[in-house]
Image: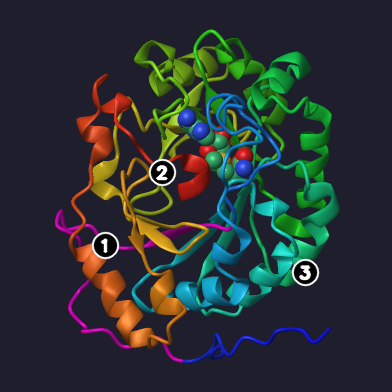
Amino acid sequence: MMQKVFPIRSAQAPAPAFDGRALVDMLGRGLRDLRISVTDRCNFRCVYCMPREVFDHDFKFVAHAEVLSFEEIARMARILAGLGVKKVRLTGGEPLVRRDLHRLVALLAEIPGLDLTLTTNGSLLPKQAAALARAGLKRVTVSLDSLDDATFRALNDADFPVSKVIEGIEAAAAAGMAPIKINMVVKRGVNDGHVLPMAERWRGSGHIVRFIEYMDVGSTNGWRMDEVVPSAEIVKMIGDRHPLESADPNYTGEVAERWRYADGAGEIGVISSVTQAFCRTCNRLRLSAEGSLYTCLFAQHGHPLKHLLRTGASDEAIANEIAAVWRARGDRYSELRTAETAKQHKIEMSYIGG
Ligand code: SAM
């Protein structure tokens, strides 16, 4: 069978022109980071993200024909790089369940000046890390919510063991993607007792554990404020045992707050999206697997662009459309969050890209 060839411009081609005015949103925030959800599917059913009773056999995932091709994603990324995007994170769903993801990495790695990374549950890294690294992936973030096997298997609800994720982390490091960032979502009464063992497991390894406050993303996880463990509590828990000092952000708008071990054994990060909202510096845009833009992780609706990609619109026209979306952006959900807003219908994180 003949392979389908997609007519795309070279990734090295000059960025498309748009109307040239500085691109800032209604709150004066620039555009820097792009999260691309390459699929809304996942091989885990983490109870706080894709609860099995909702994401079951009857759940309607995005149809394959509606999912952007790698060439369409790369085109969007190149247009967005022309609008100021400096960093791209591939996510999902689980990005590594998308077949031949390394091909997309290779296309994105050609775009000059883009910092490219990926967030994964790590389950498929042992098989894919080397190919991803060869394709140009330099960094990776792996999610791991506990080192206790029973707790982890219950949280991912796919009976997946801790040891395989650790294998994935080691495979990524061996492929040259160290230091690895390791994300742990902390939920009170579930894994808050596992914070210190997690910190200590990776202390001195060069890898960086980042503790994430449990969030009211989507509408299916039944979030409650009393299940959030504030980052300040996590910093104290670890700092009481291994003194920590605050470190400067690597760049304005960095999501994680950095803390360094005073004895030089590396650093940790905390992501306090609930207790210390960072909307003021939020420079992130999300592209869903089916080609819609979302200007906030807690968005209730998106801005579809796939029709432009599939009806021959020019790069300039698409760039202008994206610029209009960004200029109209006024989101600051985390600053406005209440128990009531948490109940609002929001797009699921697995769809929008975590
Ligand atoms: N499947 C990949 C993974 O597991 O990393 C990428 C997608 S996942 C949605 C991205 C990150 O979002 C993971 O670290 C996950 O733990 C986190 N996450 C999902 N639901 C969350 C919630 N309700 N609160 C905080 N973090 C959440």
Q: Is mark 3 within 8 Å of ligand 1?
A: no
**Residue 353 is at least partly visible in this image:** no
Q: Position of residue 127 (x, y in %)?
A: 85, 52
From mark 1 to mark 3, how far is it between C-alphas? 32 Å
Q: Is residue 287 left or right of residue 204?
A: left
Answer with the quadrant where ligand 1 appears in the image.
Answer: top right
The mark that comes first in sequence, 1 or 3, is: 1
Q: Is residue 151 magenta?
A: no
Residue hosting label 3:
134
Could you tell me which secondary element the residue under label 3 belongs to? Answer: helix
What residue did someone put label 1 on? 30
Instruction: Label 1, secondary structure: give it.
Output: loop
Give how far apart the Cα atoms at labels 1 and 2 are: 15 Å
User: Disc 1 marks which amino acid?
Assistant: Gly
Specify whether tag 2 is near ligand 1 (CB below 8 Å).
no
Q: Residues within 10 Å of mark 3 (few under 14, many from 20)?
A: some
Given residues 149 and 137, the one toward you in this image is 149
Front one among 188 and 153: 153
Residue at 48% across / 19% down in the picture? 234
Q: As displayed, is residue 314 above or below residue 147?
A: below
Q: Quadrant of residue 238?
A: top right
Residue assigned mark 2: 255
| Dominant SS in magenta | loop
**Is 105 on the left or on the right of 123, as rendered?**
left
Query: Which of pointers 3 and 2 lies earlier in the amino acid sequence?
Result: 3
Q: State the extent of the magenta-drawn residues as a range.
A: 14-38
